[in-house]
Image (cartoon, rainbow, N blue to C red):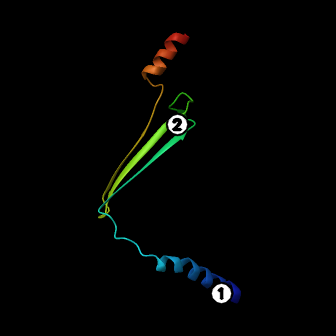
Amino acid sequence: MKYLSLAAASLAAFVALPAAAQETAPPKDVTVTGSVALVSDYRLRGVSQTDKEMAVQGGLTITHKSGLYVGTWASNLSGWGTCRSAAARSTSA
């Protein structure tokens, strides 16, 4: 038990030490972050939204230092009345 307490205290000191030594710049008023992903199939509730094809997805978040933020996310779709799928269905029938 004594060794476990010593190991836990050493780990806590080791983890906290680099954080104390870092000098950080003051936070910016507005921060913008984003992401982009290429996925194999976009599914919503188990139904493919891209006709079992690849999808490109992206998101953007704008954050103010007060904690207020706004974000958006988007993905390409196929099927459900889009032009590509409607044309494919009419020529394959």
Foreground residue among 53 and 79: 53
Q: CA distance from mark 2 to mark 1?
A: 49 Å
Foreground residue among 82 and 54: 54
What's the residue type where badge 2 is placed? Tyr
Q: Is residue 1 shown to the viewer in this render?
A: no
Q: Position of residue 33 (x, y in %)?
A: 40, 53
Q: Position of residue 79 (x, y in %)?
A: 48, 25
Quick one: label 2 or label 1, which is nearer the N terminus? 1
Q: Is residue 41 above or below residue 85?
A: below
Q: Position of residue 43 (x, y in %)?
A: 53, 37
Q: Which SS class for mark 1?
A: helix
Tell me the quadrant of the picture where the C terminus can be found.
top right
Residue for point 56% across, 35% down: 41
Residue for point 46% across, 21% down: 84
What's the residue type where badge 1 is placed? Leu
Q: Is residue 92 above or below residue 80?
A: above
Residue 6, numbered label: 1
Q: Which SS class for mark 2?
A: loop
The residue identified by callout 2 is 42
Q: Quadrant of residue 72?
A: top left
- Label 1 crowd (10 A; few <14 / some 14-19 / many >=20): few
Q: Is residue 32 shown to the viewer in this render?
A: yes
Q: Is residue 88 above or below residue 77?
A: above
Residue for point 65% across, 87% down: 6
